[in-house]
Image: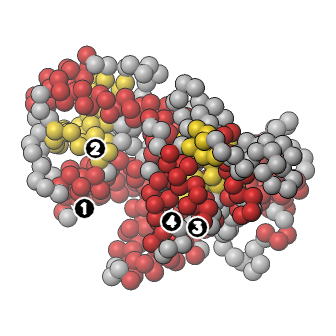
Amino acid sequence: MNSNDAEALEVWCEHVAVPASETHDLLRELQSGGLHCYPADATSRGAGILFFRRNDDELRARLRERNRGGMERVLAVVSEPLPGGVGWELLDAGAADIVPLENPRVTAAAILARFRRWDAVDRVIESAVVGGNLIGENAVWRTLLRRVVDVAKFSGMSMVIQGESGTGKELIARLIHTLDAREDKQKLIVLDCTTVVPELSGSEFFGHERGAYTGAVAARDGAFALADRGTLFLDEVGELPLRLQAELLRAVQEGTYKRVGGNTWQRTKFRLVCATHRDIEKEAEAGRFRRDFYYRIAAWTCTLPPLRERRDDIPALAAHFLQLQFKHRAVPAIDSAVVDLLLSREYPGNVRDLQHLIERIAYRHAGDGPITLGDIPEEERPRTQGQRSTWAAGELFERGARLSLLGGLGLKEIVNAAGDASVRLALDLEKGNVGRAAARLGITDRGLQKRRASWRVKDVVR
């Protein structure tokens, strides 16, 4: 989507086995509603509409190509009823949604509503609120952020954020609070459940009256009172003992509680956001987490990807963390050999692990030149002579090849699949610029274009 005006949006449109005359009235309605559709070509990027009549190989190939691995939203508009189950196939192929082509005015309203919502979400993704804190262009990461923004901005649901340590759970929780649209929204209250002492848990959550227990020399508000009309973020909620989960269940459900040592029911209303490194649905199935409490707090759940699943974001993340370290002078560039090392390294602590490594590198750096291999701390350097620095030749590539072999693919198929994936990645990294992508791959522009043309042939043959 390409617009600076929320009321005037621009998207591409493409007809697959549907005459343009069938969509003339609909396109006119869309135009009058503020959505301009321009004919798609091979270079068209961004959000768009695919008009089609039936589900076939050509349509699914177009969806996969236009979707760009989940980076772009493609609305599929069908002119004839779909057989049962076909809609799921189209969603799997890359359609963001499917709308039937019926009365032009009704269909236009449905299309406009979707693109306006998607545009509102993407404006947030592109804003400093997200871009300055949650770095990354990886398709999985961007898709997740879109879902988070959508739920945070357009609902008041309680949410559970799952993910390994260091993947950014607290940053996501803070984003949810920031985007919450309540007009009377109050503060974000953070409570780390790993620090709650069982004997004092009642006071931590509900507060206490003066003299409620030895040492309670004054009345104190707990997290439930402090979070009233705001957001309560329970970090590592999976560590709460079952007894305490039972105590919290009613308070969360009813919005009422009593202070320790008190007799008066207090009322509170807040948005609840929880985070955990555990899969608490499995924990509930195993009896280690209360099912009723899980269903109460998890109206919506998301799982943050570990850094090993978004390695293409490492250079951008490293540059961001360097910028934080060089606030008062020019940020140095990063030598390509250092980038290779950053890409090849494992990060048990995920993004936080990478941040700490960049901090150690920045501390060692002297002068105004680029970050070089000498800035890498000794304990982070390769231990074997001649170790290849490119991550693609390392463990992840071997893991992919192993899975391909186990899946019955031969060498030729694996090589072709790796080549196609590399071309798609290079085009994504160069924002669709064929010349720069070809240079990155070390092939000619014509060679890259021929490879792209072959994809469509393969899909049609299948």
Q: Quadrant of the N terminus?
A: top left
The answer to whether 406 is drawn above or below residue 127 in the figure is: below
Q: Secondary structure at mark 4?
A: loop
Q: Which corner quadrant of the image does residue 355 belong to?
A: bottom right
Disc 4 marks which residue?
290
Residue 187: % across, % down: 66, 35
Q: Residue 149, relative to residue 346: is it above or below?
A: above
Q: Is residue 262 visible?
A: yes
Q: Quadrant of the C terminus?
A: bottom left
Q: Nearer the viewer, mark 4 or mark 1?
A: 4
Task: Return the residue nearer the eye: 345 or 133.
Answer: 133
Whichever of callouts 4 and 1 sits on the residue coming sooner in the sequence is 4
Q: Residue 39: give x, y in percent of width and height.
A: 26, 31
The residue that label 2 is drawn on is 97
Q: Amino acid at mark 4?
A: Arg
Query: Dots 3 and 4: beta carbons under 8 Å?
Result: yes
Instruction: Name the side, left or right, on which 395 lies relative to 148.
Output: right
Residue underneath mark 3: 242
Secondary structure at badge 2 equals strand
Q: Is residue 387 left or right of residue 69?
A: right
Residue 343: in sight, yes or no?
A: no
